Amino acid sequence: MIRAAIPGLPKIVLHHPVLSVTAGDEFMEAYHKAKRGELEAPYVVLYEGSVADESIAGRLGGYWSAMGMEYSDDGLHKPIPTAHWLRDLAPSAAAVIAVGTCATWGGIPAAAGNVTNSMSVMDFLGEDYLSALGLPPINIPGCAPVGDNLTETIAAVLMFLVGLGPLPEFDGLGRPAWLFRDTVHRGCVRAGNYEEGVFAKNYGDPECLVELGCWGPVVQCNMVSRGALGHNGGCMNTGGICIGCTMPGFPDAFAPFYKSPPGTIVSGMASRTVGSFIRPLRRLTQGKTNWTARWKENENVPSGWGHQKQGVVEKISGFFYNKLQHSGTKFSPNSKTQKKLQESGHSFLKSDSKTKQPEEVA
Ligand code: SF4
Ligand code: SF4
């Protein structure tokens, strides 16, 4: 994106305190120009971290978070709080994008007890805030957010801002709707275990983690299906439970972490009950599908790895399963239609046909 490799995207200049090659006053120059309205280019504000109440720190003679210096005529200088940058730059910005759960909802600094009176970007800017191009704050939550969610949203918004794409769909809380519509659970690699009522008892177990404290069934996040970085990793993919870090209620609504959510009592019991019927039935079907047509005919699997046999139960259940599976179709294996077609094929091969073997032709 920064190298302008995506067709249609405008050229982007990233001013980031960690990633920019410039530092000090030279780095801050673009910010001051934007504040004075002299940048001569549209800009987008990406804000990370919650917005702490600088009046509290100011009373104590300090600041919570600052970037750049303000010089006064008497030669003194003082740090400029990042909250002031947000206040000054947001009105003329093409868009304001809050990145990460602290910026989007307040996060851990704004949890119960909140001594710094921290708040989210949308709380700070207020309900009536609209950017210069008419957008409320855009929220990309996550602690840390999925990197691809950020770049994809920025790209979609920039496409809209230059008139090359529609306004991306955002939900009522300003989240990119296509990224935060589904729950973690729906995309989880362990969801099949949940459905069959098989739950992990210890960390490191491969089954569903709900009884170890996973909140995935109610949390809107695409971490597991998208991967943490470059489509790799992601909480449950690597054995971690979901603690709801993308949600506005995080962390209080999910505490204490590592205690199973109360809803698990009902849903877990339901899954266990259904699963106790479903699992044995699926094992039977699975056993049946592990046989080739030849092995079935010979009633033997020529494998040196283990003794593979079909017992009476498997044979009887397989018989009825096949009946159900093939009912209503003429083209199932060993049906009359299939046998007729095979017979004509066999007789064609056996006949003294015009088809010659390659050596005969030569
Ligand atoms: S580990 Fe969590 S997200 Fe995955 S299936 Fe279990 S409850 Fe759902
Ligand atoms: S899966 Fe849960 S803990 Fe992991 S990033 Fe998503 S919301 Fe946060």
Image: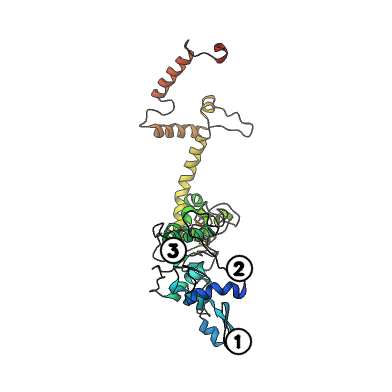
Q: Earlier in the sequence, mark 1 or mark 2?
A: 2
User: What count of labels does the image hold?
Assistant: 3
Whether residue 322 is situated above or below residue 277 in the rendered picture? above
Q: Earlier in the sequence, mark 1 or mark 3?
A: 1
Instruction: Tell me the distance, in whole angstroms, between the alpha carbons under discs 3 and 2.
Output: 26 Å
Query: Mark 3: which secondary structure?
Result: loop
Residue matched to label 3: 175
Q: Nearer the viewer, residue 87 or 319?
A: 87
Q: Amino acid at mark 1?
A: Leu
The verdict on label 3 being within 8 Å of ligand 2 is no
Task: Tell which tag, 3 or 2, sits nearer the viewer.
Answer: 2
Q: Quadrant of the C terminus?
A: top right
In-image side of 223 versus 321 (left or right):
right
Q: Amino acid at mark 3?
A: Arg
Q: Is residue 231 magenta?
A: no
Part of the protein shown in magenta: 8-16
Query: Mark 1: which secondary structure?
Result: loop
